[in-house]
Amino acid sequence: QVQLVESGGGLVQAGGSLRLSCAASGRTFSTYTMGWFRQAPGKEREFVASIARSGASTLSDSEKGRFTISRDNAKNTMYLEMSRLKSEDTAVYYCAASGVAPSGRTYSNPQQYDYWGQGTQVTVSS
């Protein structure tokens, strides 16, 4: 069992930056593929970024060049650095963990994740 806790959300002006953190419990964080998803009101949950055990990462096309995903296995923590934020980035951001992924594999499908955090709200004002 893995527990995930997101933090770092808040209100920011368009063009600004935020860093989200996802802290994981347990001693096996380094073996998980991790991911960030977001859900805006009235919309489906959508993929943002994923990082594999190896450190290989994937970002959705709309976030490339603006967001960076990283992980610190020593701290059991994953991060999402967001810059040049837009109003359409407003959503609840969730982190997720997949316990069965091969070393270099990232996942964009939320069904491939086993554990989810409660989410952190990001609001971008225009």
Image (cartoon, helix red, strand yellow):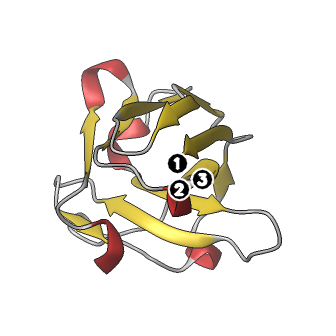
- Type of amino acid at the residue the image marks with label 1: Ser
Q: Nearer the viewer, residue 76 or 67?
A: 67
Disc 2 marks a residue whose amino acid type is Ser
Q: Residue 90 carries which label?
A: 3
Q: Mark 2 points at which residue?
A: 87
Badge 2: residue crowd in 10 Å (few <14, some 14–19, many ≥20): some
> Is residue 55 at all visible to an observer of this figure?
yes
Asked whether disc 3 touches disc 2, contact meaning CB atoms under 8 Å apart, the reply is: yes
Q: Residues within 10 Å of mark 1 (few under 14, many from 20)?
A: few
Q: In this view, does 111 lie to the left or right of 84?
A: right
Looking at this view, is 8 or 87 the one in front?
Answer: 87
Marks 3/2: CA–CA distance: 6 Å
Label pair 1/3, CB-CB below 8 angstroms: no
Front residue (pair 53, 48): 48
Which numbered disc, 1 or 3, marks the residue that appears first in the sequence? Answer: 3
Is 56 drawn above or below residue 5 in the view shown? below
Residue drawn at x 59%, y 41% is 122
Residue at 67% of width from left, 39% of height from top?
Answer: 121
Q: Where is residue 85 in the image (x, y as percent from the top left)?
A: 38, 49
Residue bearing the label numbered 1: 126
Kind of element beneath mark 3: loop
Q: Contact (CB < 8 A) between labels 1 and 2?
A: yes
Numbered disc 1: secondary structure? loop
